[in-house]
């Protein structure tokens, strides 16, 4: 198998960057729709209250971002392995960068399409009105899930698949049909007759 030319690798990496950004946008749309955002209720004296059950929902945004990070990261990892595996070890670095691009895109776009800045909406709220919290990622370490999930795919594929060193053909995994395997009856059959 021949190694990939630089121009082909650059073109495929650029294509993968566009796809990673699209994965990030799609994940942001899903994140904004799945996250259950708790609401504060504005009281007559101007302060806002939130119930205990609603306060527990504040984790929802982080949870759904993390789930989407694993799914999106695996998708990016599979696509990178399919498109760029001939590069060798740099595919892991490219995959990490592309997964960070997708994760960052998901984070930024998700917060943009969410309900907006909480402080501004709270200041404009009237007594009795319910104001949802902003869609925010409060654990930025969840971006690491994008990288871990994406990197896992090429690392496992490279370690479990055949060795694809440049200039070598993949090793044959099947035996020829006319050769008996070690467990068939033909392997134990005598090659010459000893009777006689």
Image: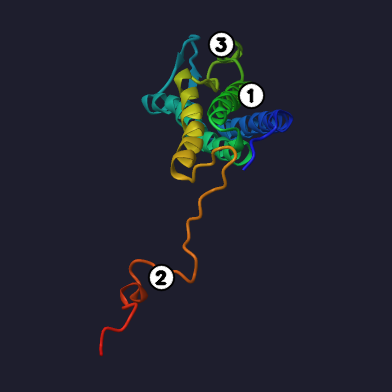
In which image quadrant can residue 33 be found? top right
Q: How many neighbours does mark 1 have within 10 angstroms: few (below 14), some (14-19), or many (20 or more)?
A: some
Mark 1 to mark 2 CA distance (whole Å): 60 Å
Q: Quadrant of the N terminus?
A: top right
In the shown orientation, is residue 189 left or right of residue 174? left
Residue for point 61% across, 12% down: 124
**Which residue occupies the extreme front position in the image?**
196
Q: Secondary structure at mark 3?
A: helix
Q: Is residue 121 above or below residue 106?
A: above
Q: Residue at x 45, y 20 (%)?
A: 141
Q: Residue furthest bottom?
A: 196
Residue hosting label 1: 109
Residue under label 2: 180
Q: CA distance from mark 2 to mark 3?
A: 75 Å
- Distance from Cα at disc 1 to Cα at disc 3: 19 Å
Of callouts 2 and 3, the N-terminal one:
3
Whether the residues at callouts 2 and 3 have beta carbons within 8 Å, the answer is no
Q: Position of residue 26 (x, y in %)?
A: 63, 34
- Where is residue 76, by image quadrant? top right
Badge number at residue 177: none
Circle 1 SS class: helix
Residue 119's disc is 3
């Amino acid at each position: 198998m021949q190694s990939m030319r630089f121009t082909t690798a650059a073109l495929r990496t650029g294509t993968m960057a566009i796809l990673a950004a699209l994965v990030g946008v799609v994940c942001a749309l899903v994140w904004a729709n799945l996250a259950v955002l708790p609401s504060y209720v504005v009281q007559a004296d101007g302060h806002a209250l939130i119930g205990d059950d609603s306060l527990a929902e504040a984790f929802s945004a982080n949870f759904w971002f993390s789930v989407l990070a694993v799914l999106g990261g695996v998708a990016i990892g599979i696509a990178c392995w399919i498109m760029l595996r001939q590069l060798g070890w740099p595919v892991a670095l490219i995959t990490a960068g592309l997964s960070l691009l997708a994760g960052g895109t998901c984070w930024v776009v998700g917060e943009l399409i969410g309900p907006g800045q909480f402080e501004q909406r709270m200041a404009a709220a009237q007594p009795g009105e319910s104001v949802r919290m902003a869609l925010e990622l409060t654990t930025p370490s969840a971006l690491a899930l994008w990288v871990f999930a994406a990197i896992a795919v090429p690392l496992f594929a490279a370690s479990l698949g055949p060795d694809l060193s440049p200039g070598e053909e993949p090793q044959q995994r099947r035996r020829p049909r006319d050769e008996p395997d070690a467990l068939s009856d033909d392997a134990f059959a005598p090659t010459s007759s000893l009777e006689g």
